[in-house]
Image (spheres, grey):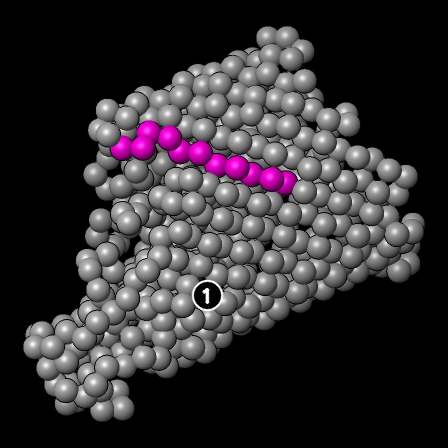
Amino acid sequence: MKKFFVSTGLAAIGVAGLQSACGQGLDVVSPKAWSVSGTLRGFYDDNYNLAHTSKGSWGTEVSPSVSVNVPLRQTDMGIRYNYSLYYYNDRDQLGVDPFDQSHQVDIWLDHAINENWKLNFTDTFTYGRQPDLTDPTSQAIYRVQGDNIANHAKISLDTQWTKLFGTSLSYGNDFYNYQNNGAGVVPNPGATPTFISSVRGNSVFGNNPNEYAAFNGTGGASLAGLLDRIEQSVGLDFNWTLSPETMVFAGYTYSWVNYTGNEPVGIVNYQNPIANPVDGHQSYIYQSSSRDGSSHGAHIGLSHQLTGNISLMGQVGASYSDNSNDPFNHSQVVSPTANVSVNYTYLPGSYVQVGVTQAHNATDEVQPGAKGGITQYQDTTGVFADWNHRITEKLMGTLIGQYSYSTYQGGAAQSQTDSSFSASLNLSYQISRHFSADAGYNFDDLISGLDGRGFVRNRVYLGLSASY
């Protein structure tokens, strides 16, 4: 199956700011027991395949949503369902399926066990047929064909032990499953020794000097083999309230990832089989699980209300990552982590938020180096800015900008970089209590050190929204 895929590095930086433009977060629920809303837009997308060679199309977006909130004496819980349908006129004329569609279900539960103990659970499930899946955990954007699944769940227990001291114990689970699968490898007798792409595993072919491995067909590793995975984490935070305006905290997080594709993702065929044999064999095949790994992270942070309208949230730390399943590059790396933001509310309904992040993120790039060793992840630094301004009582303007710089770690792409910039401008006019109109422009630019990976994308849209 043909696939379209691009990793844009830290595409999800500033998620907190993006929620103001894209909808309510899971921790913000409707004051009504239920609500219904919908959006109808016309748009033009000049690169709907997110490819180096762009194709453009006019289209139509339909996005209905329904939510139910159940507030009880000690418990608040709810569910929200969003459906998105995109029609691309150009694809219809080319005889290609013109529809992209996705389903998203959000579930939340807040339960006060007593005045000092609070339990919180959130879950977001996304199922898409040719969707744009934004993964805030790996901070990448994927556009692929097929019925694809992503699920993000988190549960936390907050305890206030004294008036000034509290703890937060949490567990997170992120699950990814892509339909694009089925890659395999075959012996390639008589082939000229050459380096071939992507990998995981511990399988080898025989020690015949003329016997080398190759992917069957021409598609290479599948997206399922590369990125099907379960990411889990357990964390404990300690927080101290120094004053009504200031809280400090420190914590530890243990994270691990298991790649579940169970397919070959990369092959090393040695240029000099006599000088570089692997247990007497000429080829080594990496499997999906070759990217399994774990990390220990420690951090300290500060939440401070500088003035009545300026707040600071900062967290810095370090992580120790261990990728033990790569026999040629068992990397053990210490790297910094950060998530710092400042929010300034200068008028009612108008604010500016800016921030910086530093983290690892998953990537579809796996290709091993000439002597083995695969790309395990990217190190990404990102900055973001979010400006919401109430122009008039009924007209709201939103401007969001993001920039990320990512460096590949390991494999043939070692030290290669991606630079990603995106910007979006939206104007929303409240026609009446239940109806609004909006117009906007989105720009994306990915500059990559890897051939054929970069792209530029422009989108404009105009539409109406209704809510009740």
Left or right, 48 with reference to 147: left
**Residue 355 image-quadrant placement:** top right
Specify the farthest residue to the top.
432
Residue 272 visible from this viewpoint: no
Whether residue 75 is visible to the viewer of this picture, yes or no, is yes
Q: How far across and down, in percent of the image, does residue 264 sit?
A: 32, 68
Residues 96 and 240: in front is: 96
Tell me the magenta residue range. 96-106
Percent x, y of residue 136: 52, 48
> Which residue type does callout 1 highlight?
Tyr
Q: Is residue 447 above or below residue 84?
A: below
Taking the spot 37% from the left edge, 26% from the top edge, the residue there is: 87
Answer above or below: position of 336 versus 121: below
Mark 1, Cα crowd under 10 Å, few <14 / some 14-19 / many 20+, is many
Task: State the residue at coordinates (58%, 66%).
Answer: 255
Give coordinates of residue 158: x percent, y percent: 80, 55
Q: Which image quarter: residue 32?
A: top right
Q: Which residue is mark 1?
A: 259
